Image (cartoon, rainbow, N blue to C red):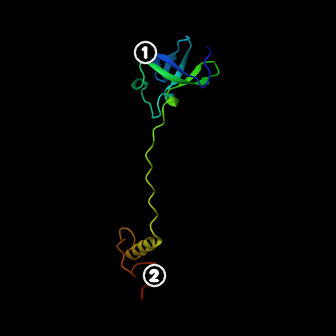
Amino acid sequence: MELEAGAIVEGRVTRIMEFGAFIEFPTGESGLVHISQVAHEFVKNIRDHLNEGDVVSVLVLGRDDKGRLDLSIKELTPAPIEPPRPKRLPRQAPEFENKLKSFLRGSGGFGGGGKKPGGGKGGRKRR
């Protein structure tokens, strides 16, 4: 029996590497579940999810250029529901922005600068 893309098959984990796990099927054929196809969340260590000797169901994704089976466990599990992201806060009202700019102009900006109104070089003269 030739395994084709889309088939769901049960197999045994025969070897675990840093990049994935090799699965052997009753037909004697084997394939690879890449670490990115183990779970929906980021998998740092594949041994946290699979052990040698485990029997797992996999989806056959297809074959690579060399005829090796590409497999997925992730595609057989429902994707987790992500909580809704918080809404962005609306921009401040323009009136508030204008009041703030006016205040900063009148106070000399952040830190004050230490100049007295009307004094010093190049400033506007007040009446």
Q: In the rendered structure, find residue 75 and report the number of the disc placed on it.
A: none
Q: Amino acid at mark 1?
A: Gly
**If the image is split into quadrants, where does the N terminus sit?**
top right
Q: Is residue 86 above or below residue 92?
A: above
**On the rendered structure, is 35 left or right of 6?**
left
**If the image is split into quadrants, where does the C terminus sit?**
bottom left
Residue pointed to by mark 1: 53
Residue pointed to by mark 2: 124
Nearest the viewer among 49 and 46 is 49
Q: Amino acid at mark 2?
A: Arg
User: In front of the other: label 1 or label 2?
Assistant: 1
Q: Considering the numbered disc 1 on the image, is that residue within a helix, a strand or a loop?
A: loop
For the image shown, how many numbered marks are present on the structure? 2
Q: Considering the numbered disc 2 on the image, is that residue within a helix, a strand or a loop?
A: loop
Nearest the viewer among 103 and 125 is 103
Q: Residue at x 35, y 68 (%)?
A: 111
For label 2, the crowd category at 10 Å Cα-Cα, with few meaning under 14, some 14 to 19 and many 20 or more, is few
**On the rendered structure, is 116 left or right of 68?**
left
Q: Residue at x 46, y 23 (%)?
A: 18
Pick out the residue farthest to the right.
65
For label 1, the crowd category at 10 Å Cα-Cα, with few meaning under 14, some 14 to 19 and many 20 or more, is few
Q: Is residue 40 above or below residue 118?
A: above
Relative image position of residue 36 (x, y in whole percent): 50, 30
**On the rendered structure, is 69 left or right of 36?**
right
Q: Quadrant of residue 69?
A: top right
Relative image position of residue 66 (x, y in whole percent): 63, 18
Instruction: Give the CA distance from mark 1 to mark 2.
Output: 84 Å
Q: Residue at x 42, y 22 (%)?
A: 50
Sequence-first tag of 1 and 2: 1
Relative image position of residue 96 (x, y in whole percent): 43, 72
